[in-house]
Amino acid sequence: MSYSEIFKDHIANPRNAGELADANAVAEETNPVCGDRLRLSLRIRDGRIEAARFLAYGCPPTLVCGSVLAEMIEGMSTYEASKLTRRKIVDAVRGLSAQKQHAAALAIETLQSAIQAQSRNL
Amino acid sequence: MRKVYLDHCATTPLDARVLTAMMPNLTESYGNASSVHLFGQQARAAVDHARRQVASLICARANEIVFTSGGTEANNLAIRGICEAAVPHGRHIITSAIEHPSVRGPIEEFEKKGWQVTRLPVYENGIVRVEDVRQAIRPDTVLLSVMLANNEIGTIQPISDIGTLVREISEARQRSLRFHTDAVQAAGRVPIDVDALGCDLLTMSAHKLYGPKGIGALFIRRGLRIAPQQVGGHQERERRAGTESVASIVGFGAAAELAKKEMHDRNEYVQRLRDRFETGVEKQIGDIVFNGDSVQRLPHVSNISFRFIEGEGLLIHLDLQGVAVSTGSACSSGTLEPSPVIRALGRNEELARGAIRFSFGKDNTDEDVDYVLEVLPRAVESLRKLSPLTHQRSIAV
């Protein structure tokens, strides 16, 4: 399937790329089969995600899902963020083919790991 | 937005002169080449003329050319046709580690049926060694299939040396070992003389040399018996049944004639563009690896691995800026298949995933090269900024 305009925009202009120097929740997950990697660093204050940054290596959907996720979760409470689903990410990029859904799954998995890491740090 | 097509190994645009040659057979000359009447005779004459043009490109005889639906069918016909006919003599095939899927596929099928297959390594330069071929040949070997030029890295294999070896061994054994070469990327790009190469079968495809899609050919040396794969018609001397696609065959003939006539000039031109591109890339972008032999390769192909990033991302970045390139790796269903060709060079997975093929054509210009040299470094930099591999490296340094 061809990519949506929003998908292309995130590829050309990734949002929230990089790492936070003062992050208090960091996670990096790898798809063990294809090797795609997503790293998420969050600054969480009083149960709210104040800032989110991502780094990604892999196929274009992995880069785009990282960008969409990092933009989407800024300002969310950690409770709201922990309820995000793969479907939400897929909808935000206006659809992904069945073969590329793993990119959205990696994004959600990394987010959940980061939130859990922050809980452990409390 | 400027559009720059650098994917001529995938396909080439139809040459306007080829289209002109095809037009009568798409309009008023619509006869079936097998019909006896005047319409049929016109079509037959057109097919015969094109057969001579295609044969001339590889210094073969016209009756040694069998038209097919393309390179894939020709490769399938060569491998299945020889192996099925050779069953009583042996069940061993030799091939290289970097063949096109249309060669790998039918060979894997025979392997599943219990045949033994030896896959020759290619080493870092992407070239098969003749000594390895000598070592691999066994008394029960019936087919050797090594491509003339590789479709991803463009390396040219020592086919005439292998052909000489095969002849020596066949004469000593007093039984023929058949030698096939897939010349889909090479035909029309490098001079080919089937006698000098010493091959028994050779595959070509029209759309790689500015001809139409859907038409290819298999050279089958005179006297060689092959099991047909398409049956139910007398066409192509009983070797490939089915009504000839006259217009496509005429287009193939015209494209072959032009390729032969203009080969030197085209090669000189695209090599100059390719070399200028590579010099520019090397100057502007760090952490890259050129894949394949720098000399023994097709003049229009450049394959580069960009460290820390994945090829598909770079491909899309370039596509959004109007530049069409190709990657040999594919990510689907959460499984990555890094290019087997780049892996066969001994490159690690990261380099195999970061490989991009740029293949130039006769219609590209210096301005195209300038544009790509402007957008490519930016695209690479943008993706590297996103990559955790780049950040890891900075920390390590």
Image (spheres, coloured by chain):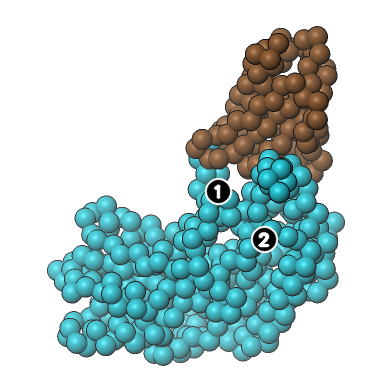
Chain colours: A brown, B cyan
Q: Do we see residue B67 in this rendering?
A: no
Front position in the image: A27 or B213: A27
In the rendered structure, which amino acid carries the disc numbered 2? Answer: Ile
For the question of whether residue B141 can be seen, the reply is yes
Occupied quadrant, residue B368: bottom right
Identify the mark nearer the N-term, 1 or 2: 2
User: Which quadrant is home to the N terminus of chain B?
Assistant: bottom right
Check the residue under mark 2 and report the chain it is in.
Answer: B
Q: Position of residue A16 (x, y in %)?
A: 81, 32
Letter of the chain that mark 1 sits on in the rendering:
B
Q: Quadrant of residue B361?
A: bottom right
Circle 1 packing at 10 Å, graded few (<14), some (14-19), many (20+), is some
Q: Residue at x 37, y 67 (%)?
A: B120
Closer to the camera in the image, B257 or A28: A28
The residue located at (47%, 82%) in the rendering is: B51
At mark 2, the secondary structure is: strand
Residue lying at the far front of the rendered structure: B397
Q: Quadrant of residue A39?
A: top right
Q: Is residue B161 left or right of residue A51?
A: left
Query: Which disc, if any, is residue B288?
Result: 2
Q: CA distance from mark 1 to mark 2?
A: 20 Å
B338 left or right, relative to B73 = right
